[in-house]
Amino acid sequence: MKALLLLFFTVVAIESRRRRFPHSSLYASTSNSEMTYTWKEYKFETRLDNFDFTNLNTFNIRYLVNMDSYSTGGPIFFYTGNEGQIEEFANATGLMWDLAGTFKAAVVLAEHRYYGDSQPYGDYDKSYASADTLAYLSSEQALADYAALLTWLKNGEKDPKKPVSFSADTKVIAFGGSYGGMLSAWFRMKYPHVVDGAYASSAPVLYFNNAPGVEWGGFDMITTETFAKSGCDNDVIKKSWEAVKNLTQTEEGQKFLNDLFNVDQKSLVNSPDDADALNDYIREGIEYMAMTDYSYPSDFLKPMPASPVKYACDKYLKAGSGLTEDKAIVTAMAGITSVYFNYNNFNPNYTVCFKDGCDDAGGLVDDRSERHTVLQECTEIVMTMCAEGGNNDFFWNECAIDPITMMKQGCPVWFQSQKWKEGMLGVNAISTEYGYSWNGVTNVILTNGELDPWRAGGVQKGDNARRLFATSITNSAHHFDLRQPNTCDPSNVAWIRYQAVQAMWCFIDSSKCTNDLDILDNKPSIMPTDISNCKDIVGGYPWGQNSTPAISTFAALFVFIAYALNM
Ligand SMILES: *[C@@H]1O[C@H](CO)[C@@H](O)[C@H](O)[C@H]1NC(C)=O
Ligand SMILES: *[C@@H]1O[C@H](CO)[C@@H](O)[C@H](O)[C@H]1NC(C)=O
Ligand SMILES: *[C@@H]1O[C@H](CO)[C@@H](O)[C@H](O)[C@H]1NC(C)=O
């Protein structure tokens, strides 16, 4: 019994250490969204195993196509689908749709195998049945699918199953955000004859074992910075974990916590042992808020205010708050997390649930795709991250057990029925398959959001001579730059997008490469002042930008002074 209990707590502890990519349906569209993206759905028959010539099994992956802007000679904009229903990513990648007209591009989005309706064994549960059925879930297989799909689309042959037959010389630009950004960048790396360039946003391609310059604690260091920049009292956040622990010591404190957080009946705090799980819940809200710290209100399934971190800090925990008392500290933390989990009491029935048996309130819309993501993390995508506490971040030190040891403990428990074995953990899979050096790669845009914790695992330095453009975008969060342009974007985001367009012309058409970049340049960033009426900007390219920003001399002077003062 004791062993079992221990196992249970270990697993809860490990589970809380997994950092998830936020899913777009949590924050997909803006309140005044004018964009609806339309497509036709198609199926592509792919090999179950792209690398075993004796295995002739096939299945269908889905892909979405929009030909409205396409004219012959135009490129294909190809989204390398990531861990979820492909429509989710279609909605969160407005930039690709918006630029299709400028480039006369066909828009094609492919769904990642084992996600959404692209299930090799019929449905999620059947694909999840055993290690054997999960064996073909990998980034390598997914990229091989995408290469096969594009090669088939471009073989010049008419086929009733095809939306259109593209000529062999059709140019392709891959787009992707988050894990999709990793895929689009790796796609260009591995298949340069299939894809002419890639726009990868917030792609933590280096957050793996022994990648040079990447710290395990980088993710939470940036989370902490984002809160500090937004005016939060980080000292109090640092103390809050202890304050929660203190309150769980007494029945009175437990009741206080259950009332304050409106804790679900399934999850009531009734022992000091529950403190860690509640702290994990609070931390999850904090990390997700940093990832989705967008400059305008988003409103889909879950509404969020503009710049949620600043909103939460202003309202609940301004720097210098002077809070010292446990209840006051925890009350502030409950306020902060409510901005992420249940802004404005959006769901009056919302209860806080953080124990085993609760749905994950933060990242997941879809538990089934989450299981598959975990499998990827226990095989190929083995990310090495943990909070360090101390001077690094305002969380607690969990790096005492290193991330790989942690996975070796967690994976056999999560994948017990699949009989997961330690040898399945591809500790060096990514460093072997793709490597950490981008020295041989050309024509990739790698953007990272300055506010986004995932920036820690992104490529920080490009090589402009090879058109490998890397930059960190001020005031930008998780793959913000790929979203539909908006009147409430920070001023520099339009400029980054404008430069990305110039780079993409140079990737695909030397005759239109009139403005080859020296560098992907970040400009001083001005945040929107009025966020009451934020709207999508549809078809707005070049967004009031020119090769130098099209602003009046006065405005330029103002920007210059603002920038100088900031320095
Ligand atoms: C995508 O957005 C459309 C509205 O534009 C919405 O109807 C649809 O449910 C969204 N799909 C997902 C998966 O988020
Ligand atoms: C928690 O309890 C300890 C011991 O009573 C006390 O020193 C501390 O101030 C309390 N609060 C915090 C936030 O640590
Ligand atoms: C909240 O619960 C009540 C009673 O069960 C139900 O009628 C109502 O629709 C729920 N509201 C929301 C927003 O889910």
Image (spheres, grey):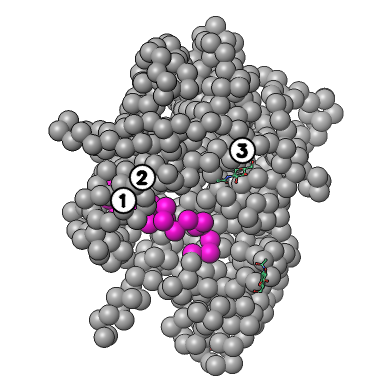
Q: Mark 2 points at which residue?
A: 119
Between residues 435 and 21, which one lies in front from this camera angle? Answer: 21
- Residue found at x 31% / y 81%: 5
| Foreground disc of the pair 3, 1 | 1
| Residue occupied by mark 1 | 127
Callout 1 crowding tier (Cα within 10 Å): few <14, some 14–19, many ≥20: many
10 Å neighbourhood of mark 2: few (<14), some, or many (≥20)? Answer: many
Q: Depth check: 165 or 376 in front?
A: 165
**Is tag 3's residue or tag 1's residue first in the polypeptide sequence?**
1
The picture places residue 362, in percent across and down from the top left corner, at 53, 61
Q: Which mark is residue 204?
A: none
**Of 90 and 118, the residue lying toward us:** 118
Q: In the rendered structure, which amino acid carries the disc numbered 1?
A: Ser
**Which residue reaches farthest front?**
160
Q: Name the residue under label 3.
A: 483
Q: Residue 52 sits in which quadrant?
A: top left
Which residue corresponds to the image point at 27% horizontal and 49% vertical from the top-left?
A: 134
Looking at the rendering, the stretch of residues picked out in magenta corresponds to 360-381
Q: Which of 361 and 472 is in front in this view?
A: 361
Give the position of the N terminus as an image quadrant.
bottom left
x 51%, y 56%: residue: 365
Amino acid type at mark 2 = Gln
Q: Earlier in the sequence, mark 2 or mark 1?
A: 2
